[in-house]
Amino acid sequence: MMKRGVHGKAGKKVLIEEYLSGREISIHAFCDGEHATLFPAAKDHKRIFDGDKGPNTGGMGTIVPVSAVNNRDKKEIEQKIIIPTLSALKKRGYPFVGILYPGIMITKDGPKVIEFNARFGDPEAQSYMRILETDLLDILLASVRGKLKDVNVHWNNNYACCVVCASDGYPGNYISGKTISGLDKISNKDIVLFHAGTKIQDSHILTNGGRVFGITATGRTLNQALSKAYGATKIISFPGMFFRKDIGK
Ligand code: GLY
């Protein structure tokens, strides 16, 4: 990599960091510059193949909440990661307003930060939207106005999952323009599809990207949510549709 200069100037310097081994989770927090309201923990599945094999993708599926993340971990993430980050940004004159999304590794020494994103995770957001009870706009407006403390953000007690259906070949080369069928055959209101790489042409919905859509489902248990989402993969399809079979496993 360095010999061929594949990263240009940025690749001339190497930073050696502690290797973080453990369980990777996604944490999100609404932030109003000073206060933060944490979401329940989410789990993304970033590799293309089952068993976390193959190249990284944008994310092949999520579950929410992650029962394995305990209250002590959540408290530590809030007190040692989110709040100090907000305080430091405010002190530097850049109060952060929006969604803070650190990727976290739960190690044997507790939660550690892998990266920070200043946006929703995709496909974490798809699962989150299925269990968020409070109006998203109210929360966002309160964040912008510095009044997050006045909003009681409520998540219902269901589990939600999202199974991403991708074009065969993603994250490498793939062919778009395949007709998607079965979209009108889903009547269970617990199942909602979020389109990502699709387009309408001559009244047909066609594939138009690597990650084509995410099938979300909710249930009283994680298994219920998963079986509804995987059930929908038998109804909705397009030629070359690929998805992981082990989301939430
Ligand atoms: N799900 C990974 C990301 O949004 O970066």
Image: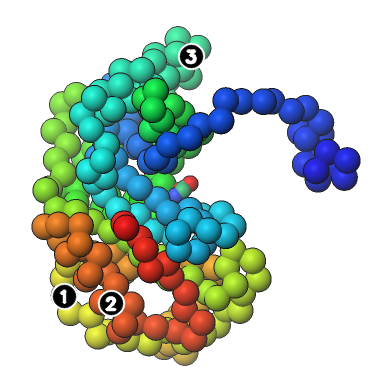
Q: Which element is circle 2 on?
A: helix
Out of 139 and 71, give the one closest to the viewer: 71
Q: Secondary structure at mark 1?
A: loop
Q: Does the beta carbon of the residue at mark 1 sit less than 8 Å from ligand 1?
A: no
Q: Which residue is mark 2?
A: 232
User: Can residue 92 be seen in this snapshot?
Assistant: yes
**Residue at the image point whose x is 41% and y is 88% from the top:** 203
Quadrant of residue 2 within the rendered picture: top right
Kind of residue at badge 3: Gly
Q: Is residue 55 left or right of residue 84?
A: right
Answer with mark 3 or mark 1, whichever residue precedes in sequence: 3
Which of the 4 image quarters holds residue 72? top left
Dot 3 and dot 2 residues touching (CB under 8 Å): no
Q: Residue furthest front?
A: 108
The label number, if any, that marks residue 188 in the structure image:
1
Give the labeled residue for mark 3: 93
Q: Amino acid at mark 2?
A: Ala
Is residue 36 visible in this depiction of the protein? Answer: no
Tell me: residue 189, above or below residue 26: below
Give the residue type at disc 1. Asn
Crowding around mark 3 (Cα neighbors within 10 Å: few <14, some 14 to 19, many 20+) is few
Front residue of 63/18: it is 18
| Vertical position of residue 227 compared to residue 101: above or below | below
Of the pair 127 and 202, the residue shown nearer to us: 127
Q: Position of residue 150 (x, y in %)?
A: 15, 26
Distance in Å between CA atoms under marks 3 and 1: 48 Å
Q: Residues within 10 Å of mark 2 (few under 14, many from 20)?
A: many
